[in-house]
Amino acid sequence: MVTSTNDTAVVFVHGLHGHPEKTWRQFQTLVDHETVSAMYPWWTSCDEFFYSYNSDDQIDPNTIKLSAFVSRVFPVPMWDLIGAGRTLPRRRYERLMLVGHSEGGVLVRSVVLHQVQKYNRLGREDLARALESDPILKANLRLFAPATWGALVSGWKGVLLRSPILGDSLEPLLSSSPGYQQLTAQSPMLQDIRMRTVECARRYPAITAFRAQNLFGTQDRLVCFGALATDPPAEYEQGCTHTSICKPTVSYLRPLAFVRHDEFNLPCSGRAAAV
Amino acid sequence: MNSTSHAQDELQRFDGDFFRARGVQEIAVSGRQFDAVADMEALAWLALGVELGVFPAESADDLLNRYRQRLSASLEHVERLGSSKFFPARIQTVLDQFAGGHRIAEIRYAERLSSGLLDTRLVEMLIHEAGETFQDSALVVPLRFQSTEEWAVIFEDSPDPAALLSGEPRTSMDRLFQGYLSFIDHAGTLHGIVSDLRNDDANSYPVRELEYRVRAIHRWRVDLLDPEVRQRFVHLTAIFIRAILDDDELMQLGFDTQGLLYKIETVCAQWSGDTEFTMNIPTGFRTWRAASS
């Protein structure tokens, strides 16, 4: 939804076998709900972008595509290049929120690192200046059930988990099977993303994009819980599953509040240094 | 947001999902039955979208005129097959008025809805959801249009979960299963969207009417009230349950196969509007498995 004076771009990135619309169901409508928008007026100054990609592809090529998309959205949206279908009003956003679910959380982290990589020929001082002035690295990250520590998919188990309708039948059982989770948590790609993100967050404490706010459902049996050492502590929502955690309803408004979460927008070098 | 241009965008998306993705096929070639009935379904969705203010009426008429020749041929084909086998009287009224050359906004029938009665964006989502699976004939064609012999041939293979996960089916059975699983997700998602609409007003007449209309337009694909379709669907579900039972890992985890069956039955009950829907697959799965293996 796009109005003329919005100053914030919110980019939503779904997870493995997720969907740009269904994964985020009611984010599209609740922000305009009379009562809800009165409670969260901040949302009325946001444009929401629901990014679509093929999650069967590997993380690295998907990172490059998402990175290109984000660059076309922020700070100046290039409507003709992002499939808007028509030219919308010109604007310059002041804030960028990157919101990921499950594998989408990993992709968002990876996009941040990809942005850093663009400057890797610079010397230390120039690099610090370049990173601190990069608009995308000023983004705030909000991750719903991110798969930063691994997830699981194979055989009939994978077929069931892939289904948003039937997957809930299996999720509870996997909590008693940490072996599966360990297996994918050791993926070299995930290890690399975790390690480099923590390293960057420690080296550049003023850059917000290296730290993410993480929210998990206590009934999530698909991903390992936990934030990175340099993130603020993960938050939990009682009774939510892997799929329901990021779907606000009139009786579950936390996703709206979570994306809005202001506290972490400030640099938190003290906290990072203490970890 | 300019609502007129947004409605135009929605119509453009509709055109892509419901009309353009399928090429015009000659009568009597394989898949023509599916395509012809799907064309009539698209017409009914278009009328519903105009009725609820999702699409601009004038542009919808332009779209209709662009495809009128193709739609007329499809209508003739469906009438030869017997349109009452696919659509209830309310939808047939839409088809008749289209045949009579009515403009889309002029189509009249009882229980007409209007724009502003329902959250337009949720209605858009409903139509998007229908559009995403609109071309998917993997389940519908075998279930509705294939002979008993053709149906039996598919079962010479077993479904392969690796092929299903990779999205690269190797056999007709894999393709059928892809369609089956996609249907379960689609039916569950449609029900979820209608539930979201209902959240605002549980006893809302427009929501009940919309739910009826969606079934009337869409149920022909997996018409579980048709005995033969139902029998085939139950057969497929039994194969699915059997495959799960044969998965040692899932059994070691203590997977609740009966719970899975219950969930599938619930989705089917919501889809068909038959609250008593059950598949009567033997409940003593382990015994049944031993007996059938």
Image (cartoon, coloured by chain):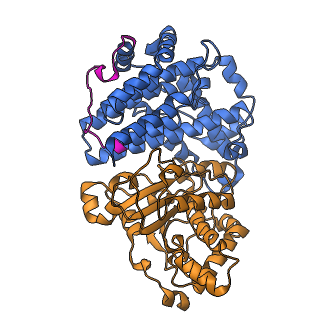
Chain colours: A orange, B blue
One can see residue B267 in this view: no
Residue at 38% of width from left, 58% of height from top?
A248
Q: A275 above or below B73?
A: below
One can see residue A166 in this view: yes
Residue at 66% of width from left, 56% of height from top?
A153
Q: Nearer the viewer, residue B17 or A124?
A: A124
Total numbered labels:
0
Q: B80 above or below A152?
A: above
Q: What is the x, y in percent for residue B92?
A: 38, 16
Q: Is residue B153 left or right of residue B201?
A: right
Q: Quadrant of residue A124?
A: bottom right
Residue at 49% of width from left, 14% of height from top?
B69
Please state, as top left, top right, bottom left or bottom right, where the C terminus of chain A lies in the image.
bottom right
Q: Quadrant of residue A224?
A: bottom right
Q: Main secondary structure of the magenta part?
A: loop
Q: Find out whether residue B100 is within the magenta segment.
A: yes
Q: What is the x, y in percent for residue B61?
A: 38, 24
Residue at 33% of width from left, 19% of height from top?
B103
Q: Find out whether residue A53 is within the magenta segment.
A: no
Instruction: Point out the stretch of residues depicted in magenta.
Output: B99-121
Q: What is the x, y in percent for residue A28?
A: 39, 52
Q: Nearer the viewer, residue A39 or A71?
A: A71
Q: Is residue B134 left or right of residue B45?
A: right
Residue extending farthest to the top is B80
Q: Nearer the viewer, residue A25 or B254?
A: A25
Q: What is the x, y in percent for residue B216?
A: 39, 26
